[in-house]
Amino acid sequence: MTFNHSKLMGLMREKKYSQEKLAKAMGISQAALWNKIHNVSEFNAKEILIAMTVLGIEDPMPYFFS
């Protein structure tokens, strides 16, 4: 499933999370996160839950699903 990454990227900027910092928190490489953000690969449920916790996201729909 593809998604528009602009909301996620905006929230990352707001929370001062670089791709490197978020990737580290998620336990994946920065390259893997880049691939997920740019729809090369998909986020799995565990990765979405970690990102939601780290970034304070309550509703994953606007950030991870289109």
Image (cartoon, rainbow, N blue to C red):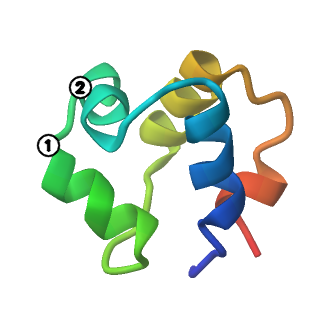
In primary-sequence order, the first of circles 1 and 2 is 2
Residue 26 is drawn in which quadrant? Answer: top left
Callout 2 secondary element: helix
Above or below, 5 against 11 in this view is below
Quarter of the image with the C terminus in it:
bottom right
In the displayed structure, would residue 13 be above or below residue 35?
above
As drawn, 7 above or below 50: below
**Residue at label 1?**
29
For the point 63% across and 29% down, the residue is 52
**Residue 17 x/y as whole percent:** 46, 29
Q: Could you tell me which secondary element the residue under label 1 belongs to?
A: loop
- Left or right of 66: which side holds 37? left
Distance Cα–Cα, label 1 vs label 2: 7 Å
Of the residues shown, which amino acid type is indicated by label 2? Lys
Q: Amino acid at mark 1?
A: Ser
Q: Image point 33% across, 73% down: which residue?
A: 41
Residue 24, labelled with which disc? 2
Residue 41 as seen in the image, left or right of residue 58: left
Report the residue at 43% width, 38% height from top. 47
Tell me where residue 22 appears, x and y as whole percent: 37, 31
